[in-house]
Structure formats: C-alpha cells, structure tokens
Image: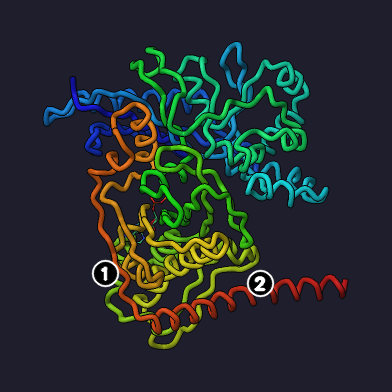
C-alpha cells in the first residue's frame, strides 16, 4: 500500500496534462503531451477526439508510472480519477461503435456566427441569457450542434433515433474511461452549452427546441464530485471510480478554495480569467459578465460570475517580441521596480478590443501620457499595471452585479509569479492577494473533487491543508488608489474615443456615398 492519491486529468486546448496528487497535496507523478490542432477554414478550429483520447490515455499511464516509480518511497495508491477540461468543445459519437462522427468543434471556432446572428435577430438573446447566464456567441457549444445537424440531415435522423451521443470533452473522456458505460457531464460543463437552465439545474426543452438539438443526444448531468462510473482496466490500466469533473475555470476556482460567496480567483495568462463565487445565487449580470455554474465546498452546485480580460500577459509578450524592450517576461519585474511609478504613462492593451465591462470591439491598444522622459521601464511598468487595472475593473463589475464584496483575490497563471504585479494588484484592490505555492490549481481542483468522493480527503479543508501560499497585503493609500484609478479610466476613455471617432468617420463616409 502506498500513499492514497488521485489521478487528475487536465485536458486543455493544446495539450493534456496528468498529475498524480497524493493526500498531502504533493505531485507524485506527472506527464504532458500536445496534440494536433486542425484549422480547415478561416475561423474554424477542430480536434480529433480519438487523438485526444489516445494522447490523454498515454499521458495518464505515464503519470501513473512516474508515480509508482517515484523515489523517496512514496508509491501512489490511486483511489479515484478527476477530470478537468477545455470547456465548450463538442464531440458527437456513435453510441454503438463509440466512434466520433465528426471532428470535435473547438470553443475557439467561429463557424456558427451566422446561426448566432439569426437567433439574435429573431429576438432570442434576452430569454437565452436569462435562462443560461450566457450570450449568443459561437464560443458556446450549443450552436455547434445546431450547425452539425443542419449540415448533415442523416446525422439529425440518427440523433433523433437515439443512435448518437454528444458531449463536451469531459463527457468524451468519461465515455472512454468507462468503456462506454457512462454518458454523463457535470453542471459546470453543462452550463457552457446554451442548453442548460442554470436555475433548474437541467437541460431545458425550450432551449433544445430553439437550437434544434434532440434531447436524446445529451448526457446525464451529475454532481461535480460524485459518481461518473469506474474506469475499465484497458483504458489506462487502473480500475477506479471517475469521481470528479469540472470545466477548467471552475476547477481552478475550486482548487483555489473559492467555495463561497465573496471569494474570487484570477488566472493571469495570455488573457486573464476572473471568477467570483456568488454562493447559491445565480446572479444576472448587467455588465456583460457571464453567469455560470460552479461548485460549493463539497462539490455540490453553486454559482459564479465570470469575466475575462482579453490581453493580460500578452502585453508583456508584445513588449518582448514586438518592441524587444525585454529579453524574457520575468525581467519585467526588476525593470518595473527601477522606477517609482509610470510618470503618468498608461498603457491600455486593447489589441483586440475591450471586453468586460466596456465591450468596445473597435478599441485598440493605446499608450497615453508619453513625455521625453518616458523610458522602457515606464512602459513595462505600465503594461504590468494594466493587468491589475483590467482585473480590478472586472472584479468591481462582478461586485456591483452581485452585491457581494470580494474579501480576497486568489491568483494563478504565468504572470502571477511577478511579485511587483501582485503587490500592485493588492494595493489597487485594497484586499489581500493570495498566491498558492501549488500553481497547478486547475488539476488540483479536479483532484479535490475526485478525492473527496473517494475519501482520499475526509473534508474539503483537508485537501488544501498541505498547500502553502504567499499573501500580498494591500499597501496603497486610498488617495493614491483613487488617483491611479482615475488616470486609468481617463486612458480607457481615450481608447474608446478612438473607437467612437472611427464609428463617426464610417457613418460620415456612408452618408457621402
Ligand atoms: P497561457 O496558459 O495563457 O498560455 P501562462 O499561464 O503560461 O499563459 O502565462 C504566460 C503569460 O504570462 C505570457 O503572456 C507571459 O508574457 C506572461 N508572463 C510570464 N511570466 C511573467 C512574469 N514574470 N511577469 C509578467 N508576465 C509574465
């Protein structure tokens, strides 16, 4: 007998990571591999579901092998499997053969923009939003099914006859792990399909009718921490319960210990993903945020508000690769500290428009306040500060929507290793920022959900007991916070007025023509 452990499968957009996590929270084995991205037409993104399975199952075996040969005497006794996955990507397969009938259509795929437009023009946006907490955008899975069945009448007939099964990647992996015995998903994944009603917690017939999706296609929705069947021996070589499932952002929220209203997590990567837990209440947003299913402390149903900043760490990448003012992203920290402030320089990295809470698609990157004294250190510092300002705007929108005040921000992602950024973020928000030593919070969340159901951990707090963290306390005067925030708002107005001028020019040109 070794140390009780859980296998966490993190099935991401570009690769699969598997971690074996012991009861003390240590990683006992790990493996990672990428898989193929298909771009058949502009705006289309596909994955081969069979390849996802072959890569994921190989990586799972490698992680299990690594854990069983781990030096230091701790051999893992894996009791359960947790899955976390790229969300909104959809697979359809033949129930009889288990073979996919089409490549998986990935969340990034924009082919259903026309279907979304059609639904909006028919006036459905408001009711869809009220039921699902989402907006009519190709990002979500539902219209991908609409597209597939419209394109292939034969598939529609088979779907209606109950011969086909559909699911997000969690559902596909559960299917493969259990040898086809279980067709299930969890609320966090279901809530990203446009077919799931948040309040009632189930598939909604009206939404299925609207999106022309036969109910017979859809998986059973089960609790995120619970029973998703048992893996068959020839899947990854172990026969244990599949006991935890959550979409990547919600798994990270769970892994960060954000289990009740007021706790928020932010992932500082290419962009930033911010989720605020709102407890048992599904809060409708008035600031263009999404309402989404999340987990309470035992993995039961709960809700969160979700908002993202399109460009976060990518602004540092641009300074590195585009302007070449940095050799490596981590250098930004020391460089930012060489100056006291940005000397009035603000950098709004709206390279692809502004997301929540502004929603200004035509805005573009804007640097204001330049003088002869501006140095690259000021620019780098302004780019780091921009991540904190963008995060604060989304968090404040979430607070306004929910009436819940955030008490602490928990952080992860590549740029969260930057201490300057974390200090500035804490100061700007006026609340502590907590960064765990275990940065793989997404996999940890999946492990926690599975480990609770399989008694690797007796209680939710047990599973995070071994996780240490660094806390950045706010150290900024309120007057300074107000001054900086006002400067940022002014810079955002500049970026927006650039967009508004563009719109005005276009209107004038149209009038002349
Ligand atoms: P993703 O998963 O979105 O690819 P990661 O979580 O790996 O992103 O984070 C990478 C991003 O973080 C890059 O955009 C990079 O510029 C930025 N980054 C990485 N390290 C630092 C750092 N020390 N300071 C600031 N930005 C950083």
- Mark number, residue 269: none
Tag 2, which secondary structure?
helix
- Mark number, residue 499: 2
According to the picture, the residue beneath numbered tag 1 turns out to be 334
10 Å neighbourhood of mark 2: few (<14), some, or many (≥20)? some
User: Which quarter of the rendered picture does the N terminus lie within?
Assistant: top left
* Above or below for 512 versus 362: below
* Above or below for 149 versus 317: above
Distance between the Cα atoms at labels 2 and 1?
34 Å
* Above or below for 92 versus 105: above
Q: Residue furthest bottom?
A: 372
Residue visible at 29% across and 29% down?
A: 456
Q: Is residue 388 left or right of residue 147?
A: left
Residue visible at 43% across and 50% down?
A: 260
Residue visible at 42% across and 18% down?
A: 230
Quarter of the figure with residue 435: bottom left
Q: Residue furthest left?
A: 72
Tag 1, which secondary structure?
helix
**Position in image of residue 149 (x %, y %):** 73, 28
Q: Say which label, 2 or 1, has the lower sequence index.
A: 1
């Amino acid at each position: 007998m070794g140390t009780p452990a859980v296998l966490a499968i993190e099935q991401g957009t570009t690769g699969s990571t598997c971690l074996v996590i012991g009861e003390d929270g240590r990683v006992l084995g790990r493996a990672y591999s990428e898989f193929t991205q298909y771009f058949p037409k502009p705006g289309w993104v596909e994955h081969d579901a069979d390849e996802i399975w072959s890569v994921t199952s190989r990586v799972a075996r490698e992680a299990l092998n690594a854990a069983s040969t781990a030096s230091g005497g701790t051999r893992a006794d894996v009791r359960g499997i947790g899955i976390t996955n790229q969300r909104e990507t959809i697979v359809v397969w033949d129930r009889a053969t288990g073979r996919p009938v089409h490549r998986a259509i990935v969340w990034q795929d924009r082919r259903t923009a026309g279907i979304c437009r059609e639904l909006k023009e028919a006036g459905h946006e408001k009711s869809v939003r009220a039921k699902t907490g989402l907006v009519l955008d190709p990002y979500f899975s539902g219209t991908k099914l609409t597209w597939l069945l419209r394109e292939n009448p034969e598939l529609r007939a088979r779907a209606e006859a109950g011969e086909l099964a559909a699911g997000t990647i969690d559902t596909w992996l559960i299917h493969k792990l259990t040898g086809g015995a279980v067709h299930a998903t969890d609320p966090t994944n279901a809530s990203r399909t446009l077919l799931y009603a948040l309040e009632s917690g189930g598939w909604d017939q009206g939404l299925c009718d609207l999106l022309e999706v036969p109910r017979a296609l859809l998986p059973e929705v089960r609790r995120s921490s619970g029973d998703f069947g048992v893996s068959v021996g020839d899947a990854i070589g172990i026969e244990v319960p599949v006991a935890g499932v959550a979409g990547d952002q919600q798994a990270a929220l769970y892994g960060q210990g954000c289990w009740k209203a007021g706790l928020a997590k932010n992932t500082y990567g290419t962009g930033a993903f911010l989720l605020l837990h709102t407890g048992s209440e599904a809060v409708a947003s008035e600031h263009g945020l999404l309402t989404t299913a999340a987990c309470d402390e035992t993995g039961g149903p709960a809700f969160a508000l979700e908002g993202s900043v399109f460009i976060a760490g990518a602004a540092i990448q641009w300074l590195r690769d585009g302007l070449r003012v940095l050799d490596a992203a981590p250098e930004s920290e020391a460089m930012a500290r060489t100056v006291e402030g940005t000397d009035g320089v603000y950098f709004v990295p709206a390279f692809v428009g502004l997301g929540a809470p502004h929603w200004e698609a035509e805005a573009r990157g804007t640097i204001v306040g330049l003088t002869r004294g501006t140095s690259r250190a000021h620019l780098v510092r302004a780019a780091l500060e921009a991540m904190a300002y963008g995060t604060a705007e989304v968090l404040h929108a979430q607070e306004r929507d929910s009436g819940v005040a955030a008490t602490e921000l928990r952080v992860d992602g590549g740029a969260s290793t930057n201490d300057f950024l974390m200090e500035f973020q804490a100061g700007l928000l006026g609340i502590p920022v907590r960064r765990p030593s275990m940065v793989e919070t997404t996999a940890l969340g999946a492990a926690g959900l599975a480990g609770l159901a399989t008694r690797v951990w007796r209680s939710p707090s047990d599973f995070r007991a071994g996780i240490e963290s660094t806390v950045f306390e706010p150290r900024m005067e309120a007057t300074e916070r107000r001054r900086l925030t006002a400067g940022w708002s002014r810079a955002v107005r500049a970026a927006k007025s650039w967009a508004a001028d563009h719109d005005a020019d276009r209107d004038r040109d149209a009038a002349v023509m």
